[in-house]
Image: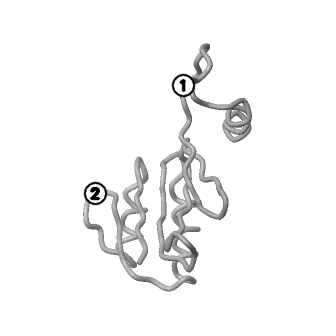
Amino acid sequence: MTVIVVTACPVGLRGHLTRWLMEISPGVFIGKITARVRDRVWARVVDMAKTGRAIMVFTADNEQGYDFVVHGHDWIPIDHDGLKLILRPHAPSSAPAKGWSNAARRRRRRYRK
């Protein structure tokens, strides 16, 4: 199963995606396609999205059972002990975050770059 969500992308991209996937809501496409087609569709999405945003989630043979790729998002995918997670950017704060160790703060700063 493959799900692609596009935001602020050209209408032509949505038309291209409907060749392979079903649009179940504006900008949300879902379907079952092969890995080869999925990779080519994603390359087309990245090429046509320009300044828009896109995310693709697909089934994978791993602990989570799925994998995902992003284009144009501020959120950063990271690997955490074999699990793929999303690191959300936080607004800069002058006060230190309570409850976080110094090592965790350094790690978060490293991934923000």
Foreground: disc 2 or disc 1 = 1
Image coords of residue 88 (percent x, y) = 53, 40
Mark 1, secondary structure of its residue = loop
Q: Where is residue 29 shown, x and y percent of the image?
A: 35, 67
Quadrant (top left, top right, bottom left, bottom right) of the N terminus: bottom left
* Residue positioned 48% across, 50% down in the render: 53
| Secondary element at image label 2 | loop
Question: Which mark is first along the chain, 1 or 2?
Answer: 2
User: Which percent across, then down, holds residue 74?
Assistant: 55, 41
- Farthest residue to the top: give it: 94
Question: How many other residues sit within 10 Å of disc 2, few (<14), some (14-19) or many (≥20)?
Answer: few
Residue 91 marker: 1
Q: Quadrant of residue 19?
A: bottom left
Query: What's the amino acid at mark 1?
Result: Ala
Q: Is residue 89 left or right of residue 20?
A: right
Residue 103 numbered mark, or none: none
- Distance, label 2 to label 1, CA atoms, is 29 Å
Quadrant for the C terminus in the image: top right
Residue sitting at x 69%, y 41%: 111
| Circle 1 residues within 10 Å: few <14, some 14–19, many ≥20 | few
Coloring basis for residues: one colour
Label 2: which residue? 26
From the viewer's side, name the closer residue of 6 and 10.
Answer: 6
Q: Is 67 placed above or below 84 here?
A: below
Q: Quadrant of residue 21?
A: bottom left
Task: Give above or below for 101 relative to 18.
Answer: above
